[in-house]
Image: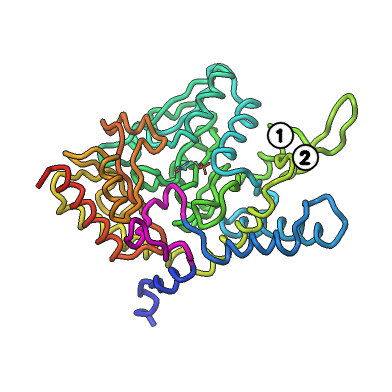
Amino acid sequence: MALAAERQPVLDVQAVRDLFPILEQRVHGKPLVYLDNAATTQRPRAVLDAMAEFYESYNANVHRGIYAFSEKASARYEEVRSKVQALIGAAAPEEIVFTRGTTEALNLVAQSWGRANLREGDEILVTEMEHHSNFVPWQMVAKETGARLRCARVTDEGRLDREDFRANLTGRTRIVALAHVSNVLGTINPVADLAREAHTRGAIVVVDGAQAAGHLPVDVRALGCDFYAFSAHKMYGPTGVGALYGRLDLLDAMEPTMGGGGMIGEVTLERTTWADVPHRFEAGTMPIAEVIALGAAVDFLLDLDRETIRAHEERLTSYALARLKSCRGVKVFGPPTTAGRAPVLSLASHDVHPHDLATVMDRDGVAVRAGHHCAQPLMRRLGVGATARASFALYNTTDEVDAFIRSLEHAEAFFRGS
Ligand code: PMP
């Protein structure tokens, strides 16, 4: 019994791959090795089917009609709120607001909670490893309100500098905004500990979960955060949709940032009252098909079990880190082991520009990303203009890691002229 309990869960990767039609594609005559999952993942058949089924068999606007299709669409749409609630451990479905994605969710908090609560001299604390989505909205609201934006440093190993975080957390900090997982370094931030520290100073905690929701088990109540944002397209769902989790008491006290249909209580010539949470924040016709397909992505993740997914992706990351050690002239950024690390690997070559690496790798069928990854402050901290980034998902295999390494060595040799 003890052995069974200790055994690492194993994912049947081939069976999983069969669920993703796009993985059968060839690129430049080579099998596709898709390693740009941090930018967007691929979608399983069930997600594609959920969208097609909506359009083919019950397409209607939600919350407006009293005919059968509209009622079915509305029910399905609202069911997804409960699915997302279950996925991230929220206390109630009303704590889930559908948005266009992480970016919109973070802007919503900045523009609604931020504008209402920040005063001149207040402070917002972010970290050096933030994606621009969790940086620029705070910079904008700081400028509008006279608040000060502070930034906690990253260590040479690519982890958050806890001492610097503490030094920047003051009695004036109203908001701490940080990534659960860095989209460049793969670093998993110890959100629960940091949230505890932030709360003792009276700040609220906003978490950018874009790189976590599809890879780690997420429990917003265990994390102790006040807001949590993520995008469906990075967790096997469609583009154009995501969610903001917010503690109900906080959401309840917030003003909407967009006015229009569906978000009102009553409209008169003089004034408008707001609908209850979460509809207050969902103005206009929402991406209904996409929300319903997000529900299929949540089912997919929960069926496979996120601990099992995590264990598989950790094995891939560990294998890739070990193989990269023997690549001459290649520097890997971020934590050196899989401890506190998600499946994102950024690297720089001594001899080859990241864009050239990615271009040559593409000819081998290997899709990696090169650039600043919307994290320019972090690039400056790392002392590079860009990195090449490989990021894994549940359908990747160790054979694909081998193909990636072979292609990397090929690119290095090509540019070294050897
Ligand atoms: N935060 C992080 C950490 C990300 O990786 C991304 C996507 N690259 C975003 C925010 C923004 O997500 P979206 O473009 O889906 O809004």
At x 53%, y 22%, the residue is 142
x and y percent of residue 13 in the render? 39, 70
Q: In this orientation, which residue lies closer to the viewer: 375 or 307?
A: 375
Q: In this orientation, which residue lies closer to the viewer: 92 or 48?
A: 48
All told, the count of numbered labels is 2
Q: In this orientation, which residue lies closer to the viewer: 184 or 42?
A: 42
The residue indicated by pointer 1 is 256
Q: Which residues are magenta?
A: 20-41
Q: Secondary structure at mark 2?
A: loop
User: Up-down: is 12 above or below 302?
Assistant: below
At x 85%, y 27%, the residue is 271
Marks 2 and 1: in contact by CB < 8 Å?
yes
x and y percent of residue 349 in the render? 20, 41
The residue indicated by pointer 2 is 263
Q: Is residue 32 magenta?
A: yes
x and y percent of residue 48 in the render? 58, 61
Q: Is residue 362 left or right of residue 205?
A: left
Instruction: Tell me the quarter of the image containing the N terminus.
Output: bottom left
Q: Which of the two discs, 1 and 2, labels the residue nearer the N terminus?
A: 1
Which residue type carries mark 1? Pro
